Image (spheres, rainbow, N blue to C red):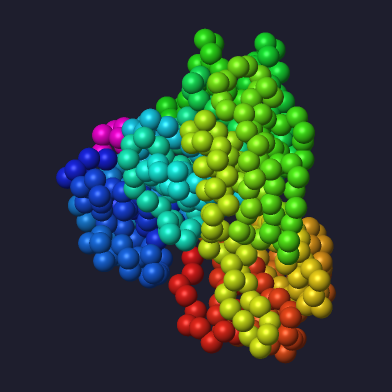
Amino acid sequence: MTDIKNLIAPGRRAFISGIGGVSTSALADLLHLRGVTVRGSDSRRSAVTDRLESLGIHVCIGHSAENLADSEYLIRSAAIHDSNPEIVAAHECGIPVYERADAWGAIMLEYAASVCVCGTHGKTTTTGFAAQAALAAGLDPTVTVGGSVPGLGTHRVGSHDLIIAESCEYCNSFLRFRPTTAVVMNIEEDHLDFFEGGIEEIRRSFERFCRMVPSGGRIAICVDTANSRALFEKLEREFAGGAADADRSLPRGFSPEDAPPVADWSAARPQLVSFSEKSPSAAVRAENITSERGRYSFDLVLDPPRLAKPSGLPEARVRVALGVTGEHNVVDALGAAAALWGVIPPEKIASGLSHAKGAARRFEFKGELDGAEIYDDYAHHPSEIAALIRAARAALEGTEGRLLLVFQPHTYSRTKAFFPQFAEVLGRADAAAVLPVYAAREDPDPSVSGELLASACGAHYAPDFADAADWARSLLRPGDMLVTVGAGEAFKAGDILLAKQPQYGK
């Protein structure tokens, strides 16, 4: 199959299946700017597809073989399956099919530096923090991030010096990227519809991602959670002269011909950087942490002696005052700092992080209803909901306000895999309502449902957004907080309460 980098050129004709996604729409923009004729399809119209059409990109609503027209190659999002009629037609006609991450990986090779942020949780916020700090320091990065960031959107096209990219592990997409700096936030079980081998397979994929970093690059790993700390310690032992015991097995989703490369570290190894909110031995860490109503300030400590080898990186202690709610944002800020250490001065890192805004749908304030505040959050994993609840409780500290949640489970496989954990964490709210499962890319599974989850945690079952809004309206009183939660369309319940026109959802 033709190397996709040869097809990303003026005059070539690309088709993007699932063009309305965050990453694919950013890719469509970039290819269009490069003179590639871009067309694509999505299952429904959205604000994103409307914007693409305003740029002159033809978007088909619905998937059909006829949509391909005279396209030379097809790029698909991770949510597009082999059974999709466009994929089937492309294979029948001999049109090469690439993953959207293949295209991003090829593009990254053109940049002097590529910072790729991965992790089960926190990668969107960390990527946004890094991008905003880099911009505030006067850099001109190309950025692709999985949520809309104020003043940035979901992406921007800058110079070829630096690209900052959110890097998702689902379908091993991030193994198609080409990082010179890999930032690992955490490693937990998720996406078990793909990772059939569970946490061990997931750990191997993250390790493979790190082993793609070239000898002159950087691997920054948070050591606050068990799996990411184990990865750091494994690499630390290896870098100190221990025998390498890298898993060289073929990652799921790859053939021998397109297996992700493993960098040659025989002559020199990448720089290995630990970061932590908790560990005093981390090279990048937070000290003197304070909080006020859920907003955290801390000393950002950059400590070169904690690195395994001399680095020439500046030593610093600078104060950061985050403008977003939730303690988990401290670690996200540390991840951004670990990526930018030595790229911009410490004072500019601290200033950029202090002025950074949170991404959309990350504890996003939506409005007020009769003295009660309404927020929306993208949390869709039990660990993320737990972090959200801690942030909300901190914001309510010192008040009589109660916390209400409207939760929409995201995918049947995730709901089934973590059913007890979802039931337990939802029970931590003062009251909760559960919507039907948002199927996303999956077929319904009758063995699991929103109704069953609601019963398990003593929550109200809301068969639709209007019912969820009615439930919340009947309970809310001044000083309370309602958070709509999930990666689907739970925000529509909040929109109804606030008498807004529900926005397009993905």
Residue 161 position within the rendered picture, expressed as x and y whole percent measured from the top left: 36, 35
Vertical side of 235 occupied by 330: above or below: below
**In the rendered image, is residue 431 in sight?**
no
Range drawn in magenta: 1-7
Return the residue nearer the eye: 398 or 225.
Answer: 398
**Residue 493 quadrant:** bottom right
Vertical side of 310 occupied by 454: above or below: below
Does residue 94 appear left or right of residue 228 in this picture? left
Residue 101 position within the rendered picture, expressed as x and y whole percent measured from the top left: 43, 42
Return the residue nearer the eye: 104 or 354.
Answer: 354
Magenta span has 5? yes
Magenta span has 384? no
Q: How many marks?
A: 0
Does residue 219 appear left or right of residue 74 in this picture? right
**Residue 219 quadrant:** top right
- Which residue lies at the image location 68% right of the left edge and 14% below the top edge? 240
Return the residue nearer the eye: 418 or 480.
Answer: 480
Residue 176 position within the rendered picture, expressed as x and y whole percent measured from the top left: 46, 36
**Residue 419 quadrant:** bottom right
Vertical side of 234 occupied by 502: above or below: below
